[in-house]
Amino acid sequence: MSRFGKHLMAGAVALGLIVVAPANSRAQDQTNYWWTGAAANGGIWETTGNWLATNNMTATAYPNVNIDSAVFTNAGAYSVSINSGDTITISNATFDCTTGGTATVTLTINGSGELNADGDPTGFSVAQGSNTTVTLYLAGGTGALNTGLYVANDLEVGHDGIGTLIFTNGLVTAVNPAVVQIGTGTGQGTVILTGPNTYLNTYQIAVGNTNVSYGNTLIVSNSASITCSSTFRVGCSSGSASSNNELIVIDGGLVNITAGAPFTVGNRGTVEGTLAYNNTIMVGNAGVIDIADHTIVVGNAATLETHLSCSTCAASGTYATDNVFQVQAGGTVSNATQICITGANTLQLYGGYFGGGIFPSTANYYLGNITNFGVFEGWGVLAGSLNNGSNTFNNALGFIAVSNQVAPLVLSNSFTTASNTVMQIALGTNYYPIAVGLGQSDPPGTPLVTNNNLVLYGTIDFVNSGGFAPGTYTLFTYPPSLIVSNNLPAPLGTLINSNQFIVAPVIGTVPNSAYTYKISTNTSGQINLIVGCTNCPPFVITSISRTNANLGNGNTDILLQFNTTGAVDRVWAGPGTANGSYTTNGMTPLTSITVNSTTTNYVDPAGATNQPARYYHISSP
């Protein structure tokens, strides 16, 4: 049988599945084997004394024919091992328990051993029965990476029970048309892949496979890896939706998706009226999701949005809200062609890398352009464009919240905002401009940077991140070489190579309504916000007086009061000269004050005890 590329899988999961061959599907009757696992037999698969055959008869063989079925229903904790060099070929394997029971099973496939469940109709299952709790620890041994667990049909974890699969070593291959289904009936599943020698190769993955299963989890960590050769969904199957599911890729974990329909967190269900909410994908700390040249959808792939190519999307009437794709610092999501955030769903970039890139096997650019009809928030690196979209058909209006007081948001290509969308920018003493690079070819393979735009319509809200005051704030930077600088037929300010440069936003909410606000493009390579204060008082010290603010000093403290227009003020002090004059060169700084209003004050403890005179100076650097 053919094998797929290797990848990792680790975690704690309870799996449940019982496979029954359809009538007349085999040339001979299927034999079901139930594990008894007598301790004296060491838990070895190939020991016949560990099995009961169909009709509760003592087994004369162990399951090792492709029509045989292996069923594990023991409660408690026990282990099963397959000897190195042995290939066990069966119809299916089911790890289950009696209703209301709990089982913890450790399955070890030693060395070059293999368990081949050819699947009729289901190849491998954990926690099939209702009200059961099953945890399966799976290790594939230390043999060649083409050994381990091989499933020719579905691998199910948490069918109607609570199932956990923790895979710590070796190879699991689930071939086409096999689907790794986590939460397949009314149950709940968890799959954890962990360890650098842990690989899962599969055709499709669905985390939350039905609309009555929720709270399912897939974790890929500690350099484990997954290769998925077709569709990967979190929060739905191709038929229905699910909620409160999550995919976590951390600590060097890798998910490699090589083909298929859009990679979705939310809803791709075809059943009218199904809901998908609170589903989450989180990538961080050297975790990687690599997508070979196709689309990401955050929310509802059944909603055809502008710029979203989805010929296989489901009909209308499905819903997806509060689904989140989060990329933390050190996380990478790369080689996507386009990304759509649908209304009421969120993409959070918290210091990672997200979007397109150069796919090594083809050396082509994948643009990773984002169309946002929901919420984009954060900072980090976007390989592609960020387009804040407006879709009046379903009233989906994009919102962008840039956390630029933490670190910069850097884009390789365009930044655009539609006329009825909103962007929020934090400004203050410390902040970072949004860097629009306009660097990738569009479309890929063309020699010039074309169809890349810096277009600002809509509304920009400004919030105070600390120390906001009148001055000039650089909102965006861009390569000035891309601006037309002479009287060409294109309007002055148009980007070369058919790009657009339009700056016409509306200023919305502001930190201080007493200030004046103006957006300026007069400086090449920058879009600036100029904050003024026509009615602000002059920058002067208005009062110097004694106070007893510090009671231990009597009445010897000095209270300074002053007007200011700065973001940060420094208070200086120094002694007078012998003739009573002073010089600022001899003054030393006492403190720095973050300014939040047009007037402020400072108490100099025991300042009145300095003889014969003490002078003060306020500066706003």
Image (cartoon, rainbow, N blue to C red):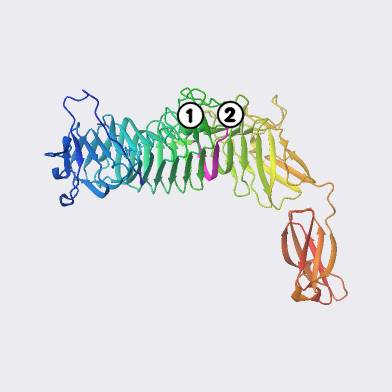
Q: Nearer the viewer, residue 293 or 7?
A: 7
* Residue at 27% over, 36% down: 150
Residues packed near mark 1 inside 10 Å, few (<14), some (14 to 19) or many (20 plus): many
* Residue that lies at the very extreme toward the front in this rendered image: 100
Q: Does dot 2 land on a helix, a strand or a loop?
A: loop
Q: Main secondary structure of the magenta part?
A: strand
Residue 222: within the magenta? no
Which residue is drawn at the image coordinates 68% and 47% (left, top)? 427
Q: Which quadrant of the structure image shows residue 193?
A: top left
Which residue matches tag 1? Answer: 274
Query: As displayed, is residue 76 above or below residue 27?
Result: below
Q: Residues within 10 Å of mark 2 (few under 14, many from 20)?
A: many
Q: Is residue 110 visible?
A: no
Assess whether mark 2 and mark 1 are in contact (beta carbons under 8 angstroms): no
Q: Residue at x 84, y 68 (%)?
A: 545
Of residues 282 and 322, the one drawn nearer to the viewer in this rendering: 322
In the rendered view, tell whether residue 530 sits above or below residue 362. Answer: below
Image coordinates for residue 491, horizontal then vertical, percent: 71, 27
- Can you identify the residue that label 2 sits on? 450
Q: Position of residue 285 (x, y in %)?
A: 46, 49
Q: Amino acid at mark 1?
A: Thr
Which residue is at a point 47% across and 39% down the rendered structure image? 244
Relative depth, front residue between 320 and 490: 320
- Alpha carbon of mark 1 to alpha carbon of mark 2: how far? 41 Å
- The answer to which of 396 and 327 lies nearer the viewer is 396
Q: Which residues are magenta?
A: 343-356
Picture coordinates of residue 92 (x, y %)? Answer: 25, 34
Report if residue 347 lies within the magenta region.
yes
Q: Secondary structure at mark 1?
A: loop
The residue type indicated by label 2 comes to Thr
Quarter of the picture holding the N terminus:
top left
Label count reads: 2
